[in-house]
Image: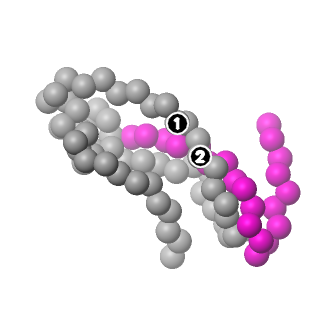
Amino acid sequence: MEFNRFIPDRPNLISFKLEVVGIDRNEFIQSWDCEWAQYITEIDIWCYNEDYPKMIEVDMRWVNPKVSYKLSITTH
């Protein structure tokens, strides 16, 4: 277990776990008989908010292996 001090309204480095879902329902991966390997299980993000998710869920149902993707996080 690791504890970090969180200072509101200042940049804080937070580690998020990545949860990948929908691989078994991705028709591109299923039709090409691809193998899936997840190399990154967590990411570090500089965060100013006091409320943040405990993990980030990445839905892979519509991901096309021929297209490059970039992960970005927005707040509302």
The percent coordinates of residue 26 (x first, y second) are 24, 38
Is disc 1 placed on a helix, strand or loop? Answer: loop
The colour scheme applied to this rendered structure is one colour
Task: Please rate how many residues cluster around mark 2, counting C-alpha atoms within 10 Å: few if below 14, some from 14 to 19, many from 20.
Answer: few
SS of the residue under disc 2 = strand
Query: Which image quadrant for residue 36?
Result: top left
Q: Amino acid at mark 2?
A: Ile
Does residue 45 appear left or right of residue 70 in this picture?
Answer: right
Residue hosting label 1: 40
Percent position of residue 46, x then y:
67, 60
Q: Residue at x 80, y 37 (%)?
A: 1
- The residue indicated by pointer 2 is 43
- Rendered residue at 52%/51% (across/down): 56
Give the image location of residue 14, x and y in percent.
70, 53
At horizontal 39% and vertical 40% (from top left) the residue drawn is 21
Residue type beneath disc 1: Ile
- Which residue is rendered at x = 31% and y = 48% of the image? 68
Task: Look at the image and give the residue range highlighted in magenta.
Answer: 1-21
Q: Are marks 2 and 1 in contact (CB under 8 Å)?
A: yes
Q: Position of residue 19 (x, y in %)?
A: 49, 41
Crowding near pointer 1: few (<14 within 10 Å), some, many (20+)? Answer: few
User: In the depicted view, which residue is nearer to us: 75 or 54?
Assistant: 75
